[in-house]
Image: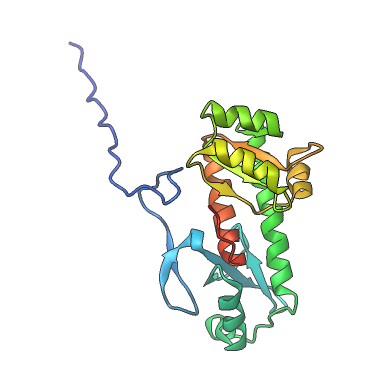
């Protein structure tokens, strides 16, 4: 007698869609901001830890050892935490905030975005070059448009007429984008749907929030 194995029940999505509409998560991990005391998703916060010599270190990838301290992705918030000694209080030891902390965080963001963009390209989710991007927009193959921060206005306007309601991110310069893609130019880039692109978009939005740059 053959015994039939019980059929696996299909998982039903019960969560709310993400604001950018590019990904879905059943449960987002949250942490509390040291400054506002507000509980927020990790995608809206920056994690910090303390080095052995008691210097504050930003940990954008959430991989460094030690107890994490979280602040809203906004430099003014981070500056407030330093001035009020909130990192020292949370770490229960004297913590030194580097004078170049803002520049350090911006540099780390750029490097992280370049790494994620390179990964998305290897996954076949990136189209670069004006003509190819325009074609991807026309064929509705892109879910996001990455425009260089130093892109010319006329090029932006032409693609804006094609993109419809596709979101636009402007967080990397043309050179920074080109370095990530290994190409000669990185002014206009189209991103296709996929997990690697979801990660890039989430990080780009966090960087935009940190820099107070409104992303369309």
Q: Which image quadrant: the N terminus?
A: top left
- Total marks placed: 0
Q: Is residue 162 above or below residue 154?
A: above
Q: Is 159 positioned to the left or the right of 45 in the image?
A: right
Question: Is residue 196 visible to the viewer in this orientation of the structure?
Answer: no
Residue situated in front as seen by the camera: 23 or 188: 188
Q: Is 73 on the left or on the right of 150, as rendered?
A: left
Quarter of the figure with residue 137: top right
Q: Residue at x 52, y 44 (%)?
A: 198
Query: Measured along the vertical axis of the image, is residue 48 above or below residue 171?
Result: below
Up-down relation of residue 175 to residue 78 (above or below): above
Q: Residue furthest top?
A: 1
Residue located at (62% from left, 31% from top): 134
Residue 20 horizontal/vertical position (percent):
45, 48
Q: Residue at x 73, y 39 (%)?
A: 181
Q: Quadrant of residue 51?
A: bottom right
Q: Which residue reaches farthest right?
A: 184
Residue 64 rendering spot, x and y as whole percentages: 63, 62
User: Splitting the image into 4 quarters, where does residue 13 fall?
Assistant: top left
Q: Is residue 174 or residue 156 the one in the foreground?
A: 156
Q: Position of residue 125 (x, y in %)?
A: 60, 33
Q: Nearer the viewer, residue 63 or 18?
A: 18
Rendering coords of residue 11 (x, y %)? 29, 36
């Amino acid at each position: 007698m053959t015994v039939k194995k019980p059929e696996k029940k299909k998982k039903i999505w019960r969560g709310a869609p993400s604001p950018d509409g590019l990904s879905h998560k059943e449960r987002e991990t949250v942490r509390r901001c040291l400054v506002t005391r507000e509980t927020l998703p990790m995608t809206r916060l920056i994690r910090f830890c303390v080095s052995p010599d008691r210097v504050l270190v930003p940990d954008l990838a959430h991989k460094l050892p030690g107890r994490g301290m979280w602040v809203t992705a906004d430099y003014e918030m981070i500056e407030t935490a330093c001035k009020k000694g909130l990192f020292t209080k949370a770490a229960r030891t004297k913590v030194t905030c580097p004078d170049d902390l803002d520049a350090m965080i911006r540099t780390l963001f750029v490097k992280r975005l370049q790494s994620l963009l390179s990964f998305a390209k290897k996954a076949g989710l990136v189209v670069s070059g004006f003509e190819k991007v325009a074609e991807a927009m026309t064929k509705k193959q892109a879910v996001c448009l990455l425009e260089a921060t130093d892109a010319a206005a006329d090029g932006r306007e032409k693609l804006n007429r094609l993109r419809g309601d596709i979101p636009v991110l402007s967080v990397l310069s043309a050179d920074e984008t080109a370095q990530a893609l290994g190409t000669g130019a990185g002014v206009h880039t189209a991103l296709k749907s996929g997990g690697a692109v979801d990660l890039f978009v989430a990080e780009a939005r966090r960087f935009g929030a940190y820099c107070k740059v409104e992303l369309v």
